[in-house]
Amino acid sequence: MMSKDEIESAVISHGFTDYKWIDPKVIVVAHWVRVKCTFGCSDYGLGTCPPNTPSVNDCDRFFKEYETGLIIRLTKYADRNAYPTEWSREMTNKLLDIEREVFLSGYQKAFLLNQTCCTLCKDCSGNRILCKDKTKSRPSPESFAVDVYQTVRNAGLDINVIAMNPSEIHRIAILLIE
Ligand code: SF4
């Protein structure tokens, strides 16, 4: 089973240097996040987004089943009208590699909340049953009702609403480990 140092080495070797260990039991889960997914987000209905995710209360209970986790913060200069999808796909694959490495070392509950809603396919099926890549699709923290802003700030990292476009943006992944 990988030690914390070995997990950090794996994270860094994939190019992620901005991360914090957290106790998943203090991840902030909130109903307002689910409301924002449902009303106002163009990704609503994608295969790993609401309504294809557990209820807010079940998400809250899910995080409490874990002993430890990592918040991984990604930074990218991006234009929301020309989102860097290739970069995003590359980051997702690296994060999945880390999840697999951690899992294979003996952490049977290892699970990644990805840095974006699943965009592995050009045309998402829009539901779990018909998902075209079931082994790689992972939900985002937001789709599991995580108040990302408060959770990241509680971990001691900065995150703010971005008003300018294009601009430097942050994407947040959470790797749950036990
Ligand atoms: S793998 Fe494809 S079909 Fe499945 S959730 Fe992701 S984008 Fe949708």
Image (cartoon, helix red, strand yellow):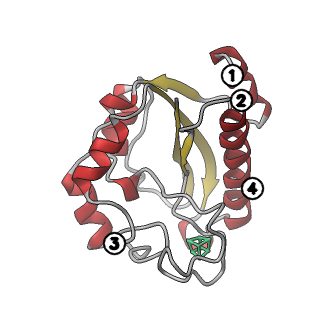
Give the Cα distance between marks 2 and 3.
Answer: 33 Å
- Give the crowd class for mark 2: few <14, some 14-19, many >=20 residues within 10 Å: few
Q: Which mark is residue 105?
A: 2
Give the residue drawn at x 59%, y 37%. 108
**Can you say which quadrant of the picture contains the N terminus?**
top right
- Which amino acid is tagged 1? Met
- Which amino acid is tagged 2? Ser
Q: Earlier in the sequence, mark 4 or mark 2?
A: 4
Give the Cα distance between marks 4 and 1.
Answer: 26 Å
Q: Which mark is residue 51?
A: 3
Residue annotated with mark 4 = 90
SS for callout 2: loop
Q: Earlier in the sequence, mark 2 or mark 1?
A: 1
Q: Earlier in the sequence, mark 2 or mark 3?
A: 3
Q: Earlier in the sequence, mark 4 or mark 1?
A: 1
Give the residue drawn at x 27%, y 51%. 58
SS for callout 3: loop
Residue annotated with mark 1 = 1
